[in-house]
Image (spheres, rainbow, N blue to C red):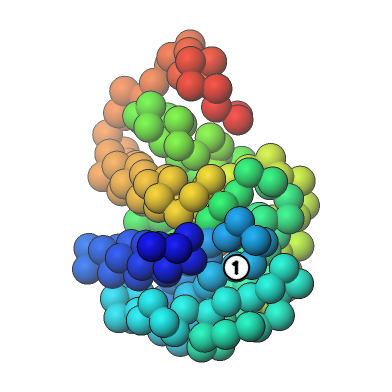
């Protein structure tokens, strides 16, 4: 199987899995993958993640011109901001996952690091997650905000909208965004219960051991 064919199959399989588990619903969410030739495969606009057709996945050239497949998601500028500012990015996943969105709306959520340090895995897979302000869907301001981070964050949470995560490949980005959602869920479940979080020393040990970009 060619690199492109495998990537198309992976996008559809991952998208369906996330849809079936309620991590995204309706026609929300999008995924992109950068191929070795620099072109992008992107989920089409207005499509359900649960019912994607590999043959209809959009393909864009290095200048984001539409080459084939259905019309791409309007969030392309958001995805391209990660590709342009983080050379190691091979895929980007964006969801409207419930617990993450809920966390984005709470007034005491830390905008510099929206996730409390409850488990080592959110630290290992995400580093610090930046909360960005609300933008209208498709607003180019989202791309500008991500570019303003100068590649220092692999994950952001769009207020009242949802998380966006970049990874070295589509599997890494998927595992990371699922970890973000699960940690957000843990944060909400334990809210007001004074949970025992990881100590600053434990956090630093994780950062050193797993070479986390913190």
Q: Quadrant of the N terminus?
A: bottom left
Query: Residue 150: where, in percent of width, then height?
Result: 76, 46
Q: Residue at x 60, y 30 (%)?
A: 213
Q: Quadrant of residue 75?
A: bottom right
- Bin the neighbour count of mark 1 within 10 Å (Cα to Cα): few under 14, some 14-19, many 20 and up: many
Q: Quadrant of the C terminus?
A: top right
Query: Residue 111: where, in percent of width, then height?
Result: 59, 46
Query: Residue 170: where, in percent of width, then height?
Result: 45, 54
Is residue 31 visible in the rendered structure shown here?
yes
Query: Residue 87: where, in percent of width, then height?
Result: 69, 46
Q: Residue at x 42, y 68 (%)?
A: 5
The residue labelled by disc 1 is 40
- Is 130 left, or right, of 3 in this rendering? right
Front position in the image: 32 or 46? 32
- Is 198 left, or right, of 21 in this rendering? right
Is residue 155 visible in the rendered structure shown here?
no
Q: Residue at x 54, y 70 (%)?
A: 41
Front position in the image: 117 or 26? 26
Measured along the vertical axis of the image, is residue 147 above or below residue 205?
below
Measured along the vertical axis of the image, is residue 54 above or below residue 177?
below
Front position in the image: 168 or 61? 61
Instruction: Kindly state the secondary structure of the residue where label 1 is placed.
Output: strand
């Amino acid at each position: 199987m060619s690199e492109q064919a495998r990537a198309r199959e992976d996008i559809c399989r991952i998208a369906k899995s996330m849809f079936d588990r309620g991590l995204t619903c309706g026609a929300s969410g999008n995924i992109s993958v950068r191929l070795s030739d620099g072109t992008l495969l992107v989920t089409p606009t207005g499509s359900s993640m649960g019912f994607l057709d590999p043959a209809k996945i959009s393909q864009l050239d290095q200048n984001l011109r539409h080459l084939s497949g259905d019309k791409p998601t309007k969030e392309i500028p958001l995805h391209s901001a990660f590709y342009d500012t983080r050379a190691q990015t091979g895929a980007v996943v964006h969801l409207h996952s419930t617990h993450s969105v809920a966390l984005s709306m709470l007034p005491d959520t830390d905008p510099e690091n929206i996730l409390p340090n409850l488990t080592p895995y959110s630290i290992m897979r995400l580093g610090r997650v930046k909360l960005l302000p609300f933008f209208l869907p498709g607003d180019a301001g989202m791309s500008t905000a991500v570019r303003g981070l100068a590649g220092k964050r692999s994950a952001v949470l769009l207020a009242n909208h949802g998380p966006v995560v970049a990874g070295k490949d589509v599997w890494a980005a998927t595992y990371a965004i699922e970890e973000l959602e699960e940690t957000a869920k843990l944060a909400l479940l334990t809210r007001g219960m004074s949970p025992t979080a990881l100590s600053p020393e434990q956090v630093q040990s994780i950062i050193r051991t797993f070479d986390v970009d913190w």
